[in-house]
């Protein structure tokens, strides 16, 4: 499958779920993602690492901002953040942004492409934390079903979408890794001159 790679399965996710279940109010602490990004309007998010602010002069949004910061919310999820850091260390990569994301029941993430220099140079990783029946993700013409305890990397530079067919929320830990030279899966080198600004997101 050119757009998906399952890295691991049967990972111990119970410590991460325990942190989540202890902080249910955090799902509504920051609703900017679902309010401002139309393709994500059926989601809830908890930011653990986010783009560094204030944005540099001339930046219209965070898509071309490489620097990340640890959020205040991350203090409530030390094991979850440590998981991301450990994966980055094992891969010899630099951790970028990290977000806990719920996709609501019978809902979808609408088709879109992650554009900009930040995404262009990084691999996007998903850890499935809670997903009754499995998580459906599509990239290009491929669709996979991701299951709880599985770690995946996929190509977010092509049009992709997700669907939750179940009656319960689907929860993923999503984070980005800047790989060492020559070690990325779907990341392009920082000196690649291709212009991702011409890739247009026509999400519904």
Image (spheres, rainbow, N blue to C red):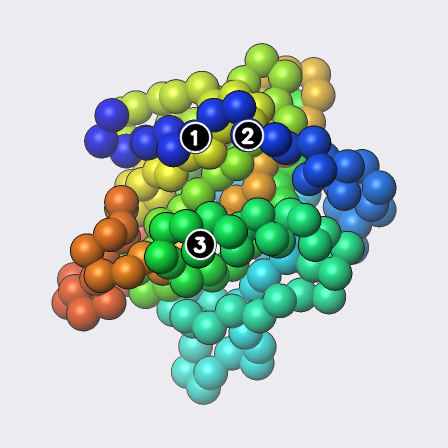
Distance CA(mark 1)–CA(mark 2): 7 Å
Residue 124 relative to residue 194: left or right? right
Q: Which residue is mark 1?
A: 8
Distance CA(mark 3)–CA(mark 2): 16 Å
- Work out whether residue 119 or residue 90 is closer to the camera in this orientation and state it: 90
Q: Residues within 10 Å of mark 3 (few under 14, many from 20)?
A: some
Q: Residue furthest bottom?
A: 57
Please give the name of the residue rendered at 63% of the width and 32% of the height, measured from the top-left corner.
13
> What is the secondary structure assignment of the residue under circle 1?
strand
Residue 108 in the image, given as x and y percentages of width and height: 54, 29
Residue 195 in the image, given as x and y percentages of width and height: 20, 63
Distance CA(mark 3)–CA(mark 1): 14 Å
The label shown at residue 11 is 2
Q: Residues within 10 Å of mark 2 (few under 14, many from 20)?
A: few
Q: Is residue 116 visible?
A: no
The label shown at residue 88 is 3
Residue 194 in the image, given as x and y percentages of width and height: 16, 62
> What is the secondary structure assignment of the residue under circle 3?
helix
Q: Residue furthest left?
A: 193
* Residue 184 sits above or below residue 2 on the image: below
């Amino acid at each position: 499958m050119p757009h998906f790679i399952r890295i691991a399965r049967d990972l111990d996710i119970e410590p991460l779920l325990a942190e989540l279940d202890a902080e249910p109010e955090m799902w509504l602490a920051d609703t900017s993602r679902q309010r401002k990004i139309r393709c994500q309007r059926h989601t809830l998010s908890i930011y653990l690492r986010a783009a560094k602010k204030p944005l540099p002069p001339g930046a219209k949004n965070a898509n071309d901002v490489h620097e990340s910061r640890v959020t205040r919310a991350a203090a409530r999820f030390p094991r979850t953040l440590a998981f991301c850091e450990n994966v980055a260390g094992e891969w010899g990569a630099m951790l970028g942004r990290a977000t806990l994301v719920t996709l609501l029941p019978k809902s979808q993430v609408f088709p879109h492409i992650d554009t900009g220099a930040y995404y262009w140079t990084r691999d996007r990783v998903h850890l499935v934390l809670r997903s009754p029946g499995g998580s459906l993700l599509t990239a290009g013409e491929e669709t996979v079903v991701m299951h709880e305890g599985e770690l995946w990397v996929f190509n977010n530079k092509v049009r992709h979408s997700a669907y939750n067919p179940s009656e319960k929320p689907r929860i993923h830990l999503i984070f980005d890794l800047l790989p060492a030279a020559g070690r990325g899966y779907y990341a392009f080198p920082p000196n690649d001159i291709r212009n991702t600004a011409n890739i247009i997101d026509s999400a519904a």
